Image (spheres, rainbow, N blue to C red):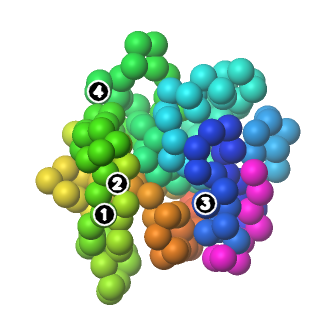
């Protein structure tokens, strides 16, 4: 499996390192030709409107939307969660998302940069110890569709899964704990790719 990390803006290097530590073939993705070479993708934290605008500038927006719609497995953290969401509350004027996840997210739901925090979370599918979660101007999930599984909560959902799509409000790439990246590879992306290959 070749996993790409969208490298237009944000903390893509940390995701790349985490994926490599999980033993997968990881590469940065900035162009449609690079997107075409990967089986799965990570959308990093950063600024969701900036990433979407840069995707437009690099002629990546529609190819990304098309690959996600076609079933490419994707993991989005923080801004990546917003970019995967079908609906966004407190969105910037004209804000666009790639979509795919039947969720409604609220931008900056936990507050401003000064309200950033860390906490331990119980995460469905990952056993002890709890997952250490870093929240930085993070969104949360206000509502989910019937096919969306909630994996972790802090009052609201902060980790969700729908088929081959996984999203977290927090930044596991900043903790040195690669269990969520491994969960994405083994429990989300690989089964989705195997299911697609059988069709």
Mark 4 vs mark 1, foreground winner is 1
* Real-space CA distance between mark 2 and mark 3, rounded to the nearest whole angstrom: 16 Å
* Real-space CA distance between mark 2 and mark 1, rounded to the nearest whole angstrom: 6 Å
Mark 4 vs mark 2, foreground winner is 2
Q: Residue 192 sits in which quadrant?
A: bottom right
Q: Residue furthest left?
A: 155
Query: Residue 109, relative to residue 127: is it above or below?
Result: above
Dot 2 and dot 1 residues touching (CB under 8 Å)? yes
Q: From which residue to which does the magenta span run?
A: 21-28
Mark 3 vs mark 1, foreground winner is 1
How many numbered marks are there?
4
**In this view of the protein, which residue sits in the foreground, 68 or 168?**
168
Q: What number is the disc on residue 118?
A: 1
In the image, residue 27 lies in the stretch drawn in magenta: yes
Which type of secondary structure does the marked residue at label 3 adopt? helix
Query: What residue does disc 4 label?
Result: 89
Which type of secondary structure does the marked residue at label 4 adopt? strand
Q: Give the mark nearer the N terminus: 4 vs 2.
A: 4
Residue 22 percent location from the top left of the image: 64, 76
């Amino acid at each position: 499996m070749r996993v790409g990390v969208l490298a237009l803006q944000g903390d893509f290097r940390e995701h790349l390192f985490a994926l490599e530590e999980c033993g997968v073939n990881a590469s940065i993705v900035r162009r449609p030709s690079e997107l075409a070479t990967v089986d799965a993708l990570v959308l990093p934290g950063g600024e969701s409107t900036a990433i979407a605008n840069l995707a437009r500038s690099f002629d990546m927006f529609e190819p990304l939307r098309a690959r996600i719609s076609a079933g490419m497995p994707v993991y989005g953290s923080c801004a990546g969660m917003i970019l995967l969401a079908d609906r966004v509350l407190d969105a910037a004027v004209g804000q666009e998302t790639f979509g795919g996840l039947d969720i409604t997210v609220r931008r900056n739901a936990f507050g401003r940069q000064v309200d950033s925090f860390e906490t331990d979370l119980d995460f469905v599918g990952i056993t002890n110890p709890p997952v250490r979660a870093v929240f930085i101007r993070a969104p949360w999930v206000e509502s989910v569709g019937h096919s969306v599984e909630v994996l972790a909560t802090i009052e609201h959902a902060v980790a969700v899964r729908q088929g081959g799509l996984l999203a977290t409000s927090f930044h596991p790439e900043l903790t040195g704990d690669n269990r969520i990246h491994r969960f994405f590879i083994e429990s989300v992306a690989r089964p989705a790719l195997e299911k697609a290959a059988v069709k």
